[in-house]
Each structure stands twice: as C-alpha cells, then as structure tokens.
Image (cartoon, rainbow, N blue to C red):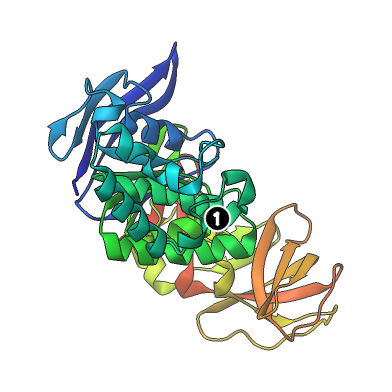
Amino acid sequence: MANVKLEGITRKYGMVSAIENITFEVPDGEFWVLVGPSGCGKSTILRTIAGLEAATSGKIYIDKQLVNNVPARARDVAMVFQNYALYPHMTVGDNLAFGLKMRGQDPFAITKRIETVGRMLKIEHLLKRYPKQLSGGQQQRVALGRAIARQAKVFLLDEPLSNLDAQLRDETRSELKILHAKLGITTIYVTHDRVEAMTLADRIVVLDNGKIQQIASPQEIYAYPANRMVAAFLGNPPMNVLPVTYIDGKFAINNQSVPIATSMCKKLEPKQGQAYELGIRPEDIVIASHKHKADSEEPKNNFAQISLNVQIVEPLGRETMVRGTLPGTELSVDLYAPAYWRGEAGDRLIIQLNLDRLYLFDAVSGAIIYPQR
C-alpha cells in the first residue's frame, strides 16, 4: 500500500487546461472519490496518476517516490476502466491471471492467487467462461478481480459502475465498500454520481472546470459546502439556491420574503439592497397546506412561510418528491413530502423553510458566506 501525492498538477492540450494546479495527498489505505460534472477533469487526473497521460507541470508521488518520468507499467497501480477492457478471447481465469503472467510470476502462485480472488468476488464458478458469456455485473467483478489479483499499491477506478443498472449499482457499491475495508488498499475513484461519492468516500474531491472546489469528508461537504457549485452539486436532489435581496431586515424573493435567523443576522451585518443567493436543502422544507387553501397553519418557531406552485410530483415509495416554482418566477424549489401526501401539478402549496438551516452565498463569486465552519 502507498500514499499518493499530487503537487500543482496541470495538464494542457494546446492552450486549453484540462486540469489546473491540482494539489492533494491521499493517505495510505484511504478511499478518495473525485466527483464533478462531465468535463471537469476528474478522469484526466486519474489517467495522469496512472501514467497514461503526462502532466504539463507539477509533481506526482506514489509511496513517496516521484513518478513523473516512470512509465505506467512500472508505477505499480491497477486501473479499472468504465468499459472494463477485458480480453474477449481469454477466459475469466486468464483475464485475471494476465497481469501476473506478464510479470513472470510462478504459475502455481498465480493459480492460487486467482482462486483466492475468485472466492473473494464470488466468481470462482465463472473462471472458465469468456467475457461475452457474462452479465454486466459479472464483467465488472472480473475487471475488479484483475486489479486485485495484481496486488498493486494503488487502485484507480474510472466510473466502474456506470454501465450497470440501478439495482446492480447499489449492490456493487456496497460490495466495493466491504472489499476496501478488507483489502485496505489506497483507492482513488472517479464518478459523476453524487450518491456514489457520498456513500463510498473517506474524503471527496469536488472538481469544476479543471480546478478543485473543495476537499473534505462527505459529512463536512454536505453540511459546510465551500461555495454554490459544491452545494448545488452534492446531494440528491441538490440544494435549492435562490437569488434574494436584503430589504428591511428580510430576504426578498420576488414578492415574497424570508426573515433572517438571529444567528445569521449577527454574522452578516448586511446592507439595504444587497444581493445574495439563499440556499436550503429539500429535507429542510415542510409543507404547511395545499390545494389552493387561502389559510395555512402558523409557521413553527424558526420557520418562514412562502407559497409554491407545484409542477412535478414524483412518488418514490418511502417519500414523495415535489418540484415547484415560486409564483411569478421561474425559480424552482425541490422538497420532500411524506409517502402518504397527495398532490398534483397545478396545486398551490404553502411551504415552510427552516431558518436555522439556511445557507448564504456571495451573489457574484458564489463563495459561502454563512454558515462558516
């Protein structure tokens, strides 16, 4: 096992920077996830660590050894690709053994290693089959097994679950977490899936436009996002972010207003007419009434009431997802309703926002203003 350290890594294609000044260190044995929208540079980082791409500038260390000029085959990393990259003319057993044979290991030791990996991943009964005879989930396990069989210092996984159906992704994600706990190998995992990032990672690296936005544990990133991009990207569904203006002690949203919680007011000292962006998670919004009722219950302590026009209702089983727009605007808000809640598109809701769970971002830079860790 080994730590992986990147110092100021930049990768340019001509005048275009795919990644810029990427700096972080993955401690020995931890599971880190690189996450962000398509084109943010996460796969480029992974390929640069593997040696499949050369950094334009910066330094890469694996197990404290500078590897910028070390060829990919000598970096002792194992990579699992999105398309699995199995050899179609080889059996599962031969696919698993290929890397070991190329390194000239003892045939008896290879056989024992393949049997061990097969049992670990529950594919021992598939060793004589060919990739075309396997399901997508089985092929994914073989690709992982080939990496495990090598006993490399570092695992690099590039969206390995993206080709699986939803149920299989959930099952395999759990298996990956259990497998990492058993093996303890330093792992860097690339995904655009928010759920994968939150559930798998010891720490998450959030990327956008080739730059790091935040590095933190899943819990810290969710509770204290560094900026609007992180807040809006992490979470399922993501945080609601609404443009607001400070007027007479309240945040104005079109023709509605939200009072400022005492804790926030003490920190801010805002000026009249100052623009912000207000954030709130869907789970911090509750429905007070619906179906065009003129009156609603009084808001709870530290809750503010506003109205919402329902656009979409999505029953999810244990809960119902509701998406609506603020009257007179195109600003959308997502929230959860109980599973038994009954509503439909066109309803007018009165919703209540938890004032103690509001976030505030700079209207220009998107940087977090409140709360601060």
The residue closer to the viewer here, 336 or 297, is 336
**In the image, residue 69 lies at what x, y percent?**
22, 20
Is the residue 360 above or below the residue 284 in the image? above
User: How packed is label 1: few (under 14 Cα within 10 Å), some, or many (20 or more)?
Assistant: some
Of the 4 image quadrants, the one containing the C terminus is bottom left
**In the image, residue 235 lies at what x, y percent?**
52, 60
Is the residue 170 above or below the residue 71 in the image? below
Residue 164 shown left or right of residue 207 in the figure? right
Residue identifier under label 1: 138
The residue closer to the viewer here, 293 or 314, is 314
Q: Residue at x 75, y 69 (%)?
A: 314
Quadrant of the image occupied by residue 202: bottom left
Q: Residue at x 51, y 51 (%)?
A: 128
**In the image, residue 40 lies at what x, y percent?**
48, 35
Judged from this view, the residue extending furthest toward the left is 64
Judged from this view, the residue extending furthest toward the front is 108
Amino acid on which the number 1 mark rests in the picture? Gln
Q: Residue at x 30, y 65 (%)?
A: 181
Q: Residue at x 39, y 28 (%)?
A: 19
Does any portion of residue 38 appear in the rendered image? yes
The residue closer to the viewer here, 336 or 198, is 198
SS at circle 1: helix
